[in-house]
Image (cartoon, rainbow, N blue to C red):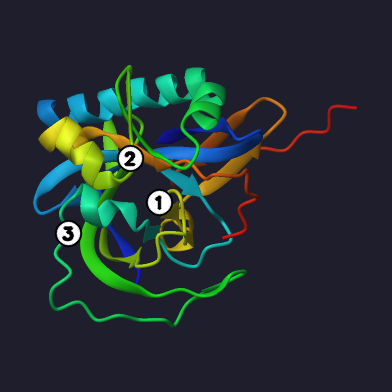
């Protein structure tokens, strides 16, 4: 399976995004995730709490993550994410973090808990991003 | 806390439609990105296919769009350009 991401320009900066299907309360939705190879785990932004009516009752607030901006409060949420090429989709199941600070992340973040299941190719020159599963590989050739 | 790979599926028709709608939303976002970032600073933007909606808050967008908000790609456009180091 070859899954294509997309570079999108936002406020003058080009960022790598991937379309992902998200299962919340037994219903599927689709969103753009920032492909973040520096993130240990997958996180959803604060805005999704309101967008998808996620119940904050009984959540356990955690602060054991840290980025450049320091610790960020979040809670965990059981979900499924589907990543695919339009025909077949790989299912990832488990807990994502959801930020409780509205300024923590503008987009959902696809971390290495998922990305480590793929070989990643970022080709900024050709504006191409590929995620290859176990059925595909790549070769590096000298062109000069 | 982590996501684990559990298997592979083919999408049913309804879910495939949702995925295809997000492709259209991504195209709309790419096409109008400069305009979105300039026109809607400090606001939430919801993109559904080729529609672009904005609101001061998510709740305002929910009032406008009802349950369709769940089909939207929602982005908070910052007041000022920011470099993301997450």
- Do callouts 2 and 1 mark residues in contact (Cβ within 8 Å)? yes
Q: Residue A130 in the image: x percent, y percent? A: 53, 36
Element assignment for label 1: loop
In the rendering, at what x and y percent does residue A50 appear? 22, 53
Discs 3 and 1 share one subunit: yes
Residue position marked by numbered label 2 in the rendering: A31
Of the image marks 2 and 3, the number of the one nearer the N terminus: 2
Question: What whole-number distance in Å separates the C-alpha atoms at marks 2 and 3?
Answer: 16 Å
Estimate the spatial distance between the alpha carbons at disc 2 and disc 1, rounded to whole Å: 8 Å
In this rendered view, identify the residue nearer to me: A32 or A46.
A46
Vertical placement of B36 versus B76: above or below? above
Measure the C-alpha gap from mark 3 to mark 1.
15 Å
* Corner quadrant of residue A29: top left
Residue at (48% x, 58% y) in the render: A116
Mark 3 or mark 1, which has the lower sequence index? Answer: 3
Q: In terms of secondary structure, where does tag 2 sit?
A: strand
- On the image, the x and y values in percent for residue A77 come to 23, 67
Q: Quadrant of residue A11?
A: top right
Q: Is residue A94 left or right of residue A5?
A: left
Residue A138 visible somewhere in the drawing: no
Left or right of A9 on screen, residue B65: left
Secondary structure at badge 3 equals: loop
In the rendered image, the vertical position of residue B11 relative to residue A111, given as above or below: above
Q: Which residue is mark 3?
A: A54
In the image, are marks 2 and 1 on the same chain? yes
Mark toward the start of the polypeptide (2 vs 1): 2
Q: Residue at x 67, y 25 (%)?
A: A126
Q: Is residue A129 left or right of residue A124?
A: left
Chain designation of label 3: A
**Residue receiving disc 1:** A108
Q: In this orientation, which residue lies closer to the viewer: A119 or A47?
A: A47
């Amino acid at each position: 399976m070859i899954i294509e991401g997309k570079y999108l320009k936002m406020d003058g900066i080009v960022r790598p995004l991937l379309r992902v299907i998200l299962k919340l309360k037994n219903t599927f939705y689709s969103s753009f995730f920032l492909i973040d190879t520096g993130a240990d785990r997958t996180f959803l932004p604060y805005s999704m709490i309101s967008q998808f009516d996620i119940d904050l009752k009984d959540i356990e607030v955690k602060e054991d993550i840290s980025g450049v901006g320091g610790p960020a409060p979040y809670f965990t949420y059981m979900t499924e994410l589907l990543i695919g090429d339009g025909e077949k989709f790989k299912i990832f199941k488990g807990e994502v973090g959801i930020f409780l600070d509205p300024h923590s992340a503008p987009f959902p973040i696809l971390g290495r808990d998922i990305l480590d299941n793929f070989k990643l190719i970022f080709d900024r020159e050709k504006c191409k991003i590929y995620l290859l599963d176990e059925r595909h590989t790549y070769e590096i050739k000298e062109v000069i | 806390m982590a996501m684990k790979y559990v298997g592979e599926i083919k999408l049913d028709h309804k879910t495939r439609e949702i995925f295809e709608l997000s492709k259209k939303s991504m195209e709309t976002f790419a096409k109008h990105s400069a305009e979105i970032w300039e026109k809607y600073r400090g606001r939430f933007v919801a993109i559904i296919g080729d529609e672009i909606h904005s609101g001061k808050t998510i709740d305002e967008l929910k009032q406008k769009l009802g349950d369709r908000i769940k089909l939207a790609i929602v982005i908070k456009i910052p007041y000022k350009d920011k470099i993301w180091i997450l």
